[in-house]
Image (spheres, rainbow, N blue to C red):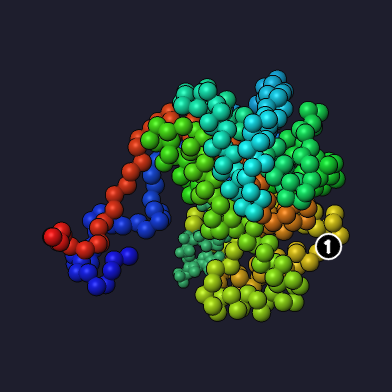
Amino acid sequence: MSDPQIPSDPPIVSDPPIFKGLAGVVVDTTAVSKVVPETNSLTYRGYDAAELATRKSFEEVAFLLWHSELPTHAEAALFSQRERANRRLNRSAQAVLNRIPETCHPMDVMRTMVSYLGSEDPDEDVPTVAANLDKALRLFAVLPTIVAADFRRRRGLAPIEPHHGLDYAENFLNMCFGEVPDPVIVDAFRASMVLYAEHSFNASTFAARVVTSTQSDLYSAVTAAIGALKGTLHGGANEAVMHDMIEIGAPENAAAWLAAKLDAKEKVMGFGHRVYRNGDSRVPTMYDSLVAVSEHCGTTTWLQIYRELAEGMEARTGIKPNLDFPTGPAYHLMGFDIPMFTPLFVMSRITGWTAHIVEQTRSNALIRPLSAYDGPIQRPVPA
Ligand SMILES: CC(=O)SCCNC(=O)CCNC(=O)[C@H](O)C(C)(C)COP(=O)(O)OP(=O)(O)OC[C@H]1O[C@@H](n2cnc3c(N)ncnc32)[C@H](O)[C@@H]1OP(=O)(O)O
Ligand SMILES: O=C([O-])CC(=O)C(=O)O
């Protein structure tokens, strides 16, 4: 923003035009996923993401995103073995985690821990595809251990070691809650991981690609992506949704709450999307999971508030929910504390981020757009 006191050049009529926020700009190709707003569809490497969420494990989807194909039985077994072997947090990393203040947001823990893990990796700066896929798998395996340990220490509880006999979702839930919950919860959690995994050039993935484009390392790119995901216009919205629902408290309060919010021209978290204009392709699947979890928990309060807000927003603005809207209450019902919601998103999106880092490395061009200057006109430096 220019200072009105200082004379500036005439208003900018930019040629080429300015696309604020890069809205509508196609900056590169990708083979990782395809978002089609017109048909409300999302595919990962050509497979329907909603179908993957109900029919495949998160480990299989991670393999797909990294290797372009779903694994064979033998590949899946080997992949799972490698994932299980890399879950443990070593002593030095545990010590770093314990030194991070519990007063900070858990996303700061994620950012700091990924950065620290980079400093421990002797291959940090090796950018080959094989080395990057190795680092990606190690982060995929260890991030749940970090999230679970951080979740428990904030509740004054000791960490629970990874369990080699459990799959990714079961092991993570066991590390958080000390038991593997009912399959309804495990399935809903697994579906959320698959649905959050990848979404083309969203802000955090783009941040990762920008960092990668300078020939920096994978940990630096992921650290930047975590920073971008934290904001409430992106991944942080899943936490904001639940704060709002708790503030609303009961379904009968939702209409007045929404009216006050919209009258004040405030954004309603969990609604709207830069790419989808007619609803987020992932919402129906996650909504089904929210219904299943609500029925299992025997409470429909959040589901009713969900419906009231969704119907109210549609009627007044035509704007529909995005994926963060059903995941917020679903994670709450699963038993997670609200500040852990965006770290859960990180655990999932690490797969998409790293698939894009590999893709950017394979076909790199420095990402450096132009800007149109609107500051003061050139003037003499005072004596
Ligand atoms: C997994 C994810 O990251 S999904 C996104 C999660 N983020 C959120 O849920 C935060 C709330 N949503 C938003 O802020 C927006 O919808 C965004 C940032 C996601 C996308 O927005 P953009 O494409 O940049 O559109 P923009 O913010 O300019 O909105 C366009 C219009 O719709 C309105 N609008 C968009 N989203 C909302 C919303 N959630 N609540 C109220 N109004 C909204 C804007 O006020 C604006 O109205 P105007 O033209 O009268 O000024
Ligand atoms: O695509 C976007 O802009 C945001 C989003 O939904 C995601 O990253 O999952």
Q: What's the residue at 64%, 54% (across, down)?
A: 103
Judged left or right of residue 318, residue 247 is: right
Residue extending farthest front? 383
Quadrant in the picture for residue 138: top right
**Amino acid type, residue under disc 1 in the picture:** Thr
Q: Secondary structure at mark 1?
A: loop
Judged left or right of residue 316, residue 382 is: left
Q: Position of residue 358 (x, y in %)?
A: 49, 31
Q: Position of residue 63 (x, y in %)?
A: 62, 30
The residue at label 1 has a CB less than 8 Å from ligand 1: no
Q: Position of residue 287 (x, y in %)?
A: 71, 56
Image quarter in which the C terminus is found? bottom left
* 99 up-or-down from 87: above or below: below
Q: What's the residue at 81%, 64% (across, down)?
A: 300
* 67 up-or-down from 21: above or below: above
Judged left or right of residue 139, residue 375 is: left
Is residue 159 in sight in this rendering? yes
Q: Return the residue at label 1.
A: 299
Q: In the image shown, does 343 or 304 lie closer to the viewer?
A: 343
* 183 up-or-down from 322: above or below: above
Q: In the image shown, does 104 or 367 lie closer to the viewer?
A: 104
Q: What's the residue at 38%, 35% (across, down)?
A: 214
Image quarter in which the N terminus is found? bottom left
Q: What's the residue at 70%, 45% (across, down)?
A: 150
Is residue 183 in sight in this rendering? no
Q: Position of residue 236 (x, y in %)?
A: 59, 55
